[in-house]
Image (spheres, grey):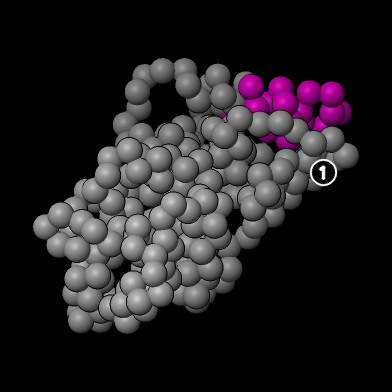
Amino acid sequence: MRLLIIEDDRDSADYLVKAFREAGHVADHAADGEEGLSLAEGGGYDVLVVDRMLPKRDGLSLIGALRDKGDRTPALILSALGQVDDRIRGLRAGGDDYLPKPYAFAELLARVEVLSRRQGGPAEETVYRVGDLELDRLSHRVMRGQEELTLQPREFRLLEYLMKHAGQVVTRTMLLENVWDYHFDPQTNVIDVHISRLRSKIDKGHGRPLLHTIRGAGYMIRDGIR
């Protein structure tokens, strides 16, 4: 899922971007209403998360401008204004959901995922399985057979991406762009270190390895490779 966070408070924005990325989504940020409108008009976002009180253009005006142009990208409004009249005003302005501050990120994530599903098209898988390895995206639970594995957030994201592309070669560039959000090679061994740690957690003690290095190409998760 690709999200646009339109929030002028830098700490709040950084927190949301980091949290959504750790949940396995792509999150971009705009710091004011004009920048947010410009990015949103570029298209390609599944959901907009819009702070109501923004510099240059407020959140309701931003959403209204998009709706006037026929853009129906789902928009969730975040606001410290949480009275019934405030929520009604936000929904009538074109918002699809309204969440008062303060909020729990788990609730925000669930609401955003619901809005994304309303867009139509096939529902994104929430559980990936390769052999006896299972990853649940919603509960962040990973099992190998009867054993529950403890993964760090980056390891979970790495495994999720590999399992989403099970049976396919995943290149270093793909991992850098989709797991680390780098659009360049930082010339470090960050991928090798995380692959090594992940391999020790999911394959150690099991007779059939699932995570494989494809020399000169990248990595692959697949059941049955010897």
> Where residue 88 sits in the image (x, y, percent)?
36, 78
> In this image, 33 relative to 43: left or right?
left
Q: Which residue is mark 1?
A: 132
Which residue is drawn at the image coordinates 56% and 52% (left, top)? 106
Q: Is residue 40 above or below residue 128?
A: below
Mark 1: few, some, or many residues within 10 Å (few <14, many ≥20)?
A: few
The residue closer to the viewer here, 17 or 187, is 17
- Residue depicted at 33% across the width and 72% down the height: 86
Residue 187 visible in image: yes
Quadrant for the C terminus, please. Answer: top right
Q: Position of residue 99 (x, y in %)?
A: 43, 63
Classify residue 44 as left or right of residue 179: left
Q: Position of residue 82 (x, y in %)?
A: 39, 65
Query: Which residue corresponds to the image point at 40% horizontal and 40% vertical from the top-left?
Result: 15
Residue 208 falls inside the magenta stretch: yes
Can residue 74 be seen here? The reply is no
| Residue range (magenta) | 197-214
Task: Label 1: state its secondary structure.
Answer: loop
Most foreground residue, 172 or 90:
90
